[in-house]
Amino acid sequence: MPKYVVRTGAARSLGLLTSPGSTLYARGARIVARTERGLEVGEVLCEATEQASAQLDQPGRGQILRAMTSEDEHELSRLHAQERREFETCRRLIAEHDLPMKLVDVEHIFGGERVVFYYLSENRVDFRDLVKALAAEFQTRIEMRQIGVRDEAKLLADYGDCGKPVCCNTHLTAMPPVSMKMAKLQKATLDPTKISGRCGRLKCCLRYEYDVYEELQRVLPAVGQHVVTGRGRARVLAQEILAQQLLVEMEDHRRVLIDANEILTVIAS
């Protein structure tokens, strides 16, 4: 039985879904599947090979039912229009109940099993009365899901400063931890407006090359260390990590840029 890695839902969750019989699906195929959440629309990313499956952390499970039909597309468009009305209704009820929460997005599951409301809040919110009012309004199961600002970008953002679709909205399955240390090591500008993403937090892409920078830096003498080169003794002033070069000050106070392979000995401090 063929098995595929499939992306489903507003949160773009990844799952390992089986396909009954001998039906095969190409990358990018839009399908209707039965998952733990109910009937959902998804996109086939690749065949679930052993290597691909090993990259997924706790993937969802389910079964592909069929390729999307024109009727399915029409129903999906109808649900998207309905989501806009559900969003406005929920926002009105939040105001009526005076709840400290910001509604971000709404997702109506394709099969109608539930409606998921995504919201931001600094504190825990008692939304029991809100859920009762929403359930009475829409006559279906209501799910309230609290998210963070990075999740908000994943749901709503479009393009980043690079001109491409934001990573969290495309290929990222988990939000990697990013710190200012990573920006400093890569000599990125420390201007918050330049290194912050659509979510207002440090850009995820600062994480991509950090491991390589760390590995390359380990083989370079640290700033402040004294070294012996073919030109004489010197003190390291700065590192050019990717170029594997060092700015050093020679004994006659000349500052020169040398390749790391010119270092003969690092003098222990």
Image (spheres, helix red, strand yellow):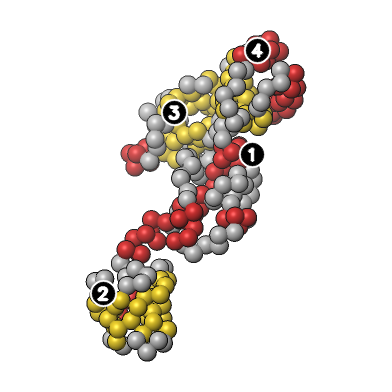
| Residues tagged 2 and 4 counted as in contact (Cβ below 8 A) | no
Residue position marked by numbered label 4 in the rendering: 129
| Residues tagged 1 and 2 counted as in contact (Cβ below 8 A) | no
2 vs 3, front mark: 2
Q: Earlier in the sequence, mark 3 or mark 1?
A: 3
| Residues tagged 4 and 1 counted as in contact (Cβ below 8 A) | no
Quarter-of-image position of residue 73: top right
Distance from Cα at disc 2 to Cα at disc 4? 69 Å
Q: Residues within 10 Å of mark 4 (few under 14, many from 20)?
A: few
Q: Amino acid at mark 2?
A: Val
Identify the secondary structure beneath mark 3: strand
Q: Residues within 10 Å of mark 3 (few under 14, many from 20)?
A: some
Q: Amino acid at mark 3?
A: Gly
Identify the secondary structure beneath mark 2: strand
Distance from Cα at disc 4 to Cα at disc 1? 27 Å
Residue 134 shown left or right of residue 217 in the figure: right
1 vs 2, front mark: 2
Quarter-of-image position of residue 193: bottom right
Q: Residue at x 38, y 79 (%)?
A: 248
Residue position marked by numbered label 1 in the rendering: 156
Q: Earlier in the sequence, mark 3 or mark 4?
A: 3
Image vertical order of residue 94 relative to residue 43, above or below: above
| Residues tagged 3 and 4 counted as in contact (Cβ below 8 A) | no
The label shown at residue 60 is: 3
Q: Earlier in the sequence, mark 4 or mark 1?
A: 4
Q: Residue at x 62, y 25 (%)?
A: 117
Nearer to the camera, 177 or 174: 177
Identify the secondary structure beneath mark 1: helix
Residue position marked by numbered label 2 in the rendering: 266
Q: Amino acid at mark 1?
A: Leu
